[in-house]
Image (cartoon, rainbow, N blue to C red):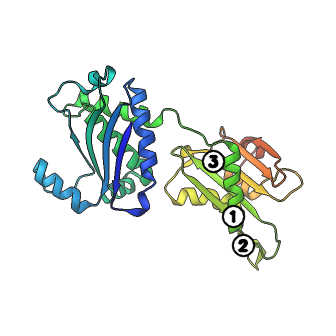
Amino acid sequence: MELDFQTSFPDFSSYEEEYQRLLGKTLHHLGLSDDVIVSVSLVDNEFIHKMNRDYRHIDHPTDVISFAFLDGEGNPLEMLRNPIRSVCLGDIYISVEKAAQQANDYGHPLKRELQFLFVHGLLHLLGYDHMSSEEEKMMFALQDKILKKGVIVMEKEKLIEKAKEATKLSYSPYSKFKVGAAVECKDGSVFLGANIENSSYPLCMCAERNALYNAYMHGYKKEDLIAFALIGDTDEPISPCGACRQVISELYPSNKPIYMANLKGMVKETNSIELLPFAFSPEDLK
């Protein structure tokens, strides 16, 4: 399996690994050989506008364009079920600027949109299309299955280590008590939080809330969160304060794990219901 990755945006170089993962995931889901070559480029609106105009005769930028090398050479799916050689599927071009606009319009993270556009473009290379309503229904349902299938949860030790890294960002000149937190999302993103103190003590903000607020400020929602870790230098695994428990109960899924740890290596797994069994909720405001 070979992915030729190029980007005009240095900050997006990490998508090479992400697209490699999605390529393998898509081929596995469809029961196809992974002896393929795919090229993907992250470009700007100006570049994709020119391609859209020159090759499709549509004079405006689009989100993704695919050029299948196997057009007219038979069914790509059949070729990949019984390959006799490496198959070069084609090129995918994705506009980062258009993806950012659509992510904002749809109210989900940019990473989710860039994942969707890659899988969409890849399915076109494999012969799928959406010219008719039935084709569109089938193709979009397949995209959703691929993107949702097999969400990989980071090992709890790694997530706890991320929380430990967050303690370095703590601003705690008064208590000298550093706390770190890390929340993981379905797409693999991890958001950190550390406690930030203030000379007016009631204005201090805990690490747990900062981590959750960080995720939400990047466009993630409750249903996107899959694991939560916090750590501090305590005798027993650290436990959230009452205010944090209330926020966690509303912003974090009740069926997902919360790992409370300390610097000695002790870990206790819990969930938001155990932390606050009689939490105040939006239902109480009705």
Image point (35%, 40%), residue name: 119
Which residue bears the numbered disc 3?
Answer: 252
Image quarter for residue 231?
Answer: bottom right
Q: Nearer the viewer, residue 10 or 140?
A: 10
| Amino acid on which the number 1 mark rests in the picture | Ala
The label shown at residue 194 is: 1
Mark 2 / mark 3, whichever is N-terminal:
2
Image point (47%, 35%), residue name: 148
| C-alpha gap between disc 2 and disc 3 | 24 Å
Locate residue 63, reporting x and y percent: 27, 51
User: Are the residues at dot 1 and dot 2 in contact (C-beta closer than 8 Å)?
Assistant: yes
User: Are the residues at dot 1 and dot 3 in contact (C-beta closer than 8 Å)?
Assistant: no
Mark 2 vs mark 3: in front: 2
Mark 1 vs mark 3: in front: 1
Residue farthest along the right direction in this orientation: 235
User: Are the residues at dot 2 and dot 3 in contact (C-beta closer than 8 Å)?
Assistant: no
Image quarter for residue 90?
Answer: top left
In the rendered image, the vertical position of residue 52 relative to residue 76, given as above or below: below
In the image: residue 60, left or right of residue 146 = left
| C-alpha gap between disc 1 and disc 3 | 17 Å
Q: Nearer the viewer, residue 268 or 252?
A: 268
Image point (73%, 53%), residue name: 230
Image quadrant for the N terminus?
A: top left
Residue farthest along the bottom direction in this orientation: 199
Mark 1 / mark 2, whichever is N-terminal:
2
| Amino acid on which the number 3 mark rests in the picture | Tyr
Which residue bears the numbered disc 2?
Answer: 171
Q: Secondary structure at mark 3?
A: loop
| C-alpha gap between disc 1 and disc 2 | 8 Å
